[in-house]
Amino acid sequence: MASPTVNNTPKGITKKNTLSGIEAVNHPPHYTQGGIECIEAIKAAMTPEEFSGYCKAVAIKYIWREKHKGGAEDIKKAIWYLTRLVAEYEV
């Protein structure tokens, strides 16, 4: 089941979130191998319910640590996972 995305980016998340010219939020290169993004491999290995829980848990992790580690970038990452979760419901 495909999720509504633009170039594998959940709708509502812009491609301009970068850190030192590297895509740090939407498509970090270290999360893609052989043309497959890690998030797609994770989704394929889980039931829809498990993937929903995964997205929620990762969003909570980024919100939890934002004051101590990543600041605004962590909030953007949490939004990315929540937007991805919403996209799963809109299929």
Image: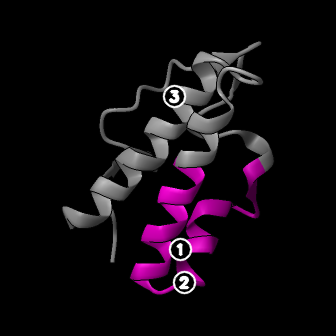
Report helix, strand or loop for mark 1.
Answer: helix
Front in this rendered view, residue 62 or 3 = 62
* Residue 26 numbered mark, or none: none
Label 3: few (<14), some or many (≥20) within 10 Å?
many
Check contact, mark 3 vs mark 1: CB within 8 A: no
Residue 21: image location, x then y, percent: 72, 15
Q: Left or right: where does residue 29 sit relative to residue 81?
A: right
Q: Left or right: where does residue 23 sit relative to residue 43?
A: right
Count of numbered badges drawn on the protein: 3
- Residue, disc 3: 76
Range of the magenta residues? 31-59
Residue 1: image location, x then y, percent: 33, 78
Question: Three-letter amino acid code at disc 3?
Answer: Lys
- Residue, disc 2: 46
For the point 37% across and 57% down, the residue is 85
Asked whether the viewer can see residue 30, the reply is: yes
Q: How is the image coloured?
A: one colour
Front in this rendered view, residue 66 or 7 = 66
For the point 58% across and 17% down, the residue is 72
Q: Is residue 21 magenta?
A: no
Nearest-to-viewer mark from 3 and 1: 3
